[in-house]
Amino acid sequence: MTPRAASPASRMSTSWIDLSASWREVLWAFVILTLPFNLYEPGSPQPGDFLLVLVLCVPILLLRFKMPPAIAWPVFSLLAFVVYVFACNFTWTAITDEYDFFKSTAFYAFNFAVFLGYLVMLGDRGDDWMRWTLYGFAATLVMLVVLSIPFADHTESGRLQLFFFNANQLAYHVLLCATIVAMIAPRYNVPRLVIYALLLCAFYLELRTYSRAGILGIALLAGLQLVHRPTLLTIAVLPLLGLALYTDLQNLDADLLQNRLQALEQSTPDDYLRDRGLDRIADHPEHLLVGAGEGYMARFHHNEQEIHSSAANLLFSYGIVGTMLFLIFVRKFTMSVGTGLTLLMVPAFSYSLFHHGMRARPFWLMLAIALGLAVLNSIEVSKKSDKRPLALADH
């Protein structure tokens, strides 16, 4: 059965600029443009979330799809982790009679639906969907640069935040957009000059947010476009990236870059652990096996502060069991997408581990896009070798 990804409507264009698409792709690009706008209070669904339900989540129920092994293994391993999140948080809800755990569970359920929904739509729409994904995230970088001029006063302690709740969220969103552009662009032969222009937009925004990790992440993405040994470059930059993330975390509330450096010198390791909520890992080791659940933070902090690190939160909230399930997904995922795409995602992965990056919708879209690219590239290889191509969808 011929896969939709190889159909005439989905065939790759000879030009990287191809605006011949249906209203579905145009709507999808518009949805991407809405993601930076947070109009409601933190933790509440935003306008872009409602559109994601319509464009990505509903099609899961309406479209028939069949996943090749390259996608099925990562998807089912991620599903196993999400099921454990449900079980862990439901158990703690029953124990504590607190319903705050449902909020975190809803985050993971929705993000998984976004992840799966993108793959379903890619299987149905093929290369047109991937190309307009590129257009949407590239346009987002340009849009944010333009908006930084009239909304220059939307800052947090001197750091640009625009329509995000803090500057680090903007920095991470920009890094994710740039990563997605860098991943997709080679498939459609986007000129290198255009890629660097978009990365320059991202670099400017990272400078405005005073995010060392963001700046270094964009620099690494740019460097990977040039070097012949990307693995060596990535390994060499990792210590610098780790240091940048560490210093960013310690100086969230200082006014400017110089003051942030001074605050770093005056802080102590205990201050860092307490401010980030990491001290509860040592104070409550009884939860490290199966997890304390993600919610009802009054158990561990008088201000109900959560752990400000995705990696530490994963370990404490879902224990070694949940962490191992997520690492199995990461292993299956990296095996499916290959070394090249994995290296491009190193800055985003690193940022996500040290911030609350796993809540960001573009993070899960990035993962789905990488899997989709791996399968689309397999289709091209199969066609060239006269083999039956892999299918993202089977109608």
Image: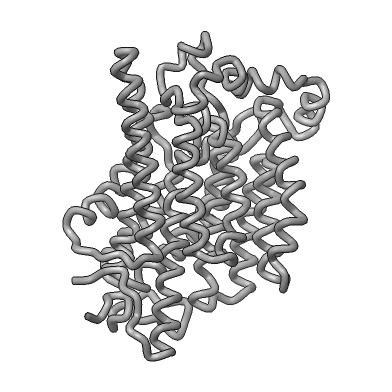
Check the picture and name the quadrant holding the N terminus.
bottom left
Residue lying at 23% horizontally and 54% vertically, measured from the top left: 60
Q: Position of residue 195 (x, y in %)?
A: 60, 68
- Does residue 357 sit above or below 266 in this rendering? below
Residue lying at 44% horizontally and 28% vertically, measured from the top left: 290
Q: How many marks?
A: 0
> In the image, is 273 to the left or to the right of 15?
right
Type of colouring: one colour
Q: Position of residue 313 (x, y in %)?
A: 52, 30
Residue lying at 77% horizontally and 20% vertically, measured from the top left: 268
Front residue of 285 and 359:
285
The answer to which quarter of the image holds residue 82 is top left
Residue lying at 41% horizontally and 22% vertically, measured from the top left: 295
Is residue 48 among the parts visible in the rendering?
no
Q: Position of residue 6 (x, y in %)?
A: 32, 80
> In the image, is 103 to the left or to the right of 167?
left
- Does residue 388 sit above or below 129 in this rendering? below
Q: Position of residue 317 (x, y in %)?
A: 47, 27
The answer to which quarter of the image holds residue 376 is bottom left
> In the image, is 294 to the left or to the right of 158?
left
Front residue of 385 and 238:
385
Front residue of 375 and 33:
375
Check the picture and name the quadrant holding the C terminus.
bottom left
Is residue 63 among the parts visible in the rendering?
yes
